[in-house]
Amino acid sequence: MRALRRVSQGVFLALFTWLVLETGFSESPPQLLELFFDLDPLISLSTWLSARSLAAGSLLALLTLAATALLGRVFCGWICPLGTVHHIASRLRPKKRGRADAEGFSRWQRAKYFLLAALLVMSLFGGHWVGVFDPLSIMCRSLTTLAFPAAQYLVADGANAVYDADPRLGPLRLTLLTEPAYRFARDDVFRVNRQTFAGGLPVLAFFVLIVALNFVRPRFWCRYVCPLGGLLGLFSRRPALRLKNDKDACRNCGRCAKTCPAAAQPHEPGKWLPSECFVCWNCAAECRSDAVAFALESPLTPPAAGRVDLSRRATMAAGVGGVAALAGFRIAPETRGEQPFPSTLLRPPGARAEREFLQRCIQCGACMRVCPTNALHPSALEAGLEGLWTPRMVAKIGYCRQECTLCGQVCPTGAIEHLPLEEKKKVKVGLAAFDVSRCLPYAYGRECIVCEEHCPLSPKAIYVVPVEVTLRDGSKRVIKQPRVDADLCTGCGICEWSCLFQDQAAIRIYSANESRNAKNQPILPGPGIPPAAPPAEAAPPPAGPYGGGETTGAGNASPY
Amino acid sequence: MAKQTRRQFIGTSVGGAVFAAGLARAQEAPAAMAIARWKGEPVMDEPTDVMAPKLARAALDAVGGMGRFVKKGDVVWIKPNMAWEQPPELAANTNPHLVAALVKMCLEAGAKTVKVGDNTCHDAKKSYVASGIEAAAKDAGAEVVYVDRDRFRSMKIGGEILKEIPVWPGMVESDLLISVPVAKHHGLSTVTLAMKNYMGVVESREKFHQNIPGCLADLTAFLKPRISVLDGIRILTANGPTGGDPKDVKRCNVVAASTDIIALDAFGAELLGYKPADISSIAAGVKLGLGEMDYRKLPAREIEVS
């Protein structure tokens, strides 16, 4: 069974990784990735609490809970891809010399339940930070912003190094091997252009930290921190699949406990902790005396097992902590939905108003993965701490494609709504503004208008005005100066992206005028200039209050 | 009318005979430029799969056939405008049926490989597919190439403005590079035609816009075009080069081929409603001696196709 468990872990890790990879290139992203998130009860529950609505697919999470109620934390032991990463990292721990002590339950293992309580109470009050700690979210986000870009860079830079060094003389060249391999990796494996993520460093630090913690204790995250583990633990207090200790056969060697990654105390009869156990089968496999085994029993009979004591006071304190954290988040004006609004927070088209958006976004990074132009990036503090790792558009790196709604298609919780294409094209993400201290026709007396070239609208949201400029030698020339049409601009960002200033663009998108926030719309729809006043003699003098009708002469409007 | 003297009669007869012989010779010799027009009033929604190959063949045959430019065993690069993620009906990219027809003609003339590719503005994969050119070119037997931004090679091109620029080696090293633009309006250069189409051969091209006429002339001088083909089946009359509004597309049903790229661009400018002398890149090309602006002088042969 242990071998079977290992195969299962491998299969699900590979499947999850492959699904996130496939999301990257496809015009029809695999719905299976969303299925993974739908099956996650932590995400389903907390999104339901904070957004007050439940997507139909989230009911699948009940299946996971049912399986957990029967079989215990098999999700943690057999399925969770992050759990598998931790499991592999734990195996890399240096072996202790001498006889290691069998680990008993540590009270710190209760921390994950308190974290769960804090997060769920916070969700109840409309704050949604579950995605920061949910293992599926962490895995998707880390694969997207760390693993795949790193792999792409290694492959590309390696191939480029060989290509540049190769003198390309003679029939036997290393590039004959590396170039086809590179093209295969680029076109058939990664299938998106190389992605880079502004704001990826905190994601990396977090991931490296939690994996490194496996060197402190095996499966540190799963034991002490994971709120999904906590939720599943609550449901597996009385499973049907139970550990059985044969007291007579047991030689008290302690092997089972030493090999238990969950510190679930398999060696002490009656002290096994089903809410901690990952059902990984290590103990049964390691036992030389056949004293440890798993068997199915009716869930109605109380198990000969221990129970994790969650002090009511501590749990309530955790809940209060969740609310306090939310209050801490909401000090920032941007999360209260008040001005000033962050000018660099450009949300993808289809994103709901900020409060509703934050109630749903689980920081999974699937939108960042699918975006073909690499426009979406994990926020650091641009959206406040509450919006940590939520997606925002960085137009200099990538713009929003006109004929595209992929981010809305993959979002598992509907934080980004899947709009019909024609509706999406009308959404304004922000407003472009020229930096006339840089833009060539303004600052340097040179022609350009690459931005106007790329504007996808017809008529374009950038128009040109011929302006006479004085050059250095005193001569005068007429050049085209670009302007933004504030009524038309949707903030797609292709102007900023294409601007030939590659350090800081001379035209930039700011969040002003975004469709989703009525308070952040400074532009009056329409031409924005009142019609010219009519000439003075056109209007006749108004009729008087008595009599009315025509007057007898100009200016003779007697009211009597 | 006075009676003709014998001398006058001999003079006009001999003159006429010489003229007729010359005319006959001119009809046999390939023209420098040919303009093929489809018979009848253009209809907006009419498919182009039959029309485009016929127009292409008529135009190319009139300038001597593809065999005049393609030798057996040549590697040919057909460089259409496929820089934008737009469907063929919006005239932002070259017509895919035209590209396919040119691919077939090159292969018939004995080319070993015909490559089709462009350094796009929008995402390459999306643009290649949306334009319809990847599929059409593959069907016709071409090798569709995606350029890799890391594989451009810096070359000294000896221009007046452009000294050294990164070029795509495959395009520059091919035996024949054919520029196949679609006639479009352009905000900066007024029109984008065969000379501007060469911008897909290079990288780091954003700064060209500070002196578009000079840079395009330098680039064209470096690439030494031997034959260029203009897609005038659908043209984009406004909001170029991206387009997007079907109302800006005009159906002209014309394909022109020329050994003189300046003459071809001049014809394209007129098709879009501009005077060639007003187009700065054409003027710059003439100054560098790249061709003749008045295409009627070449002469340009006009053919009606049905």
Image (spheres, coloured by chain):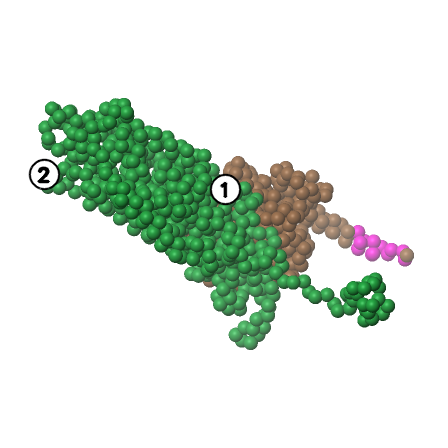
Chain colours: A green, B brown
- Residue A530 located left or right of residue A230: right
Residue B101, picture quadrant: top right
The reply to whether residue A256 is visible in this rendering is no
Specify start and end residues of the magenta stretch as a single range. Answer: B2-13
- According to the picture, the residue beneath numbered tag 1 turns out to be A418
- The chain letter under disc 1 is A
Question: Does B181 appear above or below A278?
Answer: below
- Tell me the quadrant of the picture where the C terminus of chain A can be found: bottom right
Q: Which mark is residue A99?
A: 2
Identity, as a three-letter code, of the amino acid under mark 1: His
Local packing at callout 2 (Cα closer than 10 Å; few below 14, some 14-19, many 20+) is few
Q: Secondary structure at mark 2?
A: loop
- The chain letter under disc 2 is A
Q: Are the residues flagged by discs 2 and 1 in contact, CB closer than 8 Å?
A: no
User: Is residue B8 inside the magenta stretch?
Assistant: yes
Question: Does A85 appear above or below A509?
Answer: above
**Of the residues under marks 2 and 1, which one precedes in the sequence?**
2
Identity, as a three-letter code, of the amino acid under mark 2: Arg
Q: Nearer the viewer, residue B16 or A12?
A: A12
Residue found at x 65% / y 48%: B247
Residue found at x 53% / y 54%: A518
- Tell me the quadrant of the picture where the N terminus of chain A can be found: top left
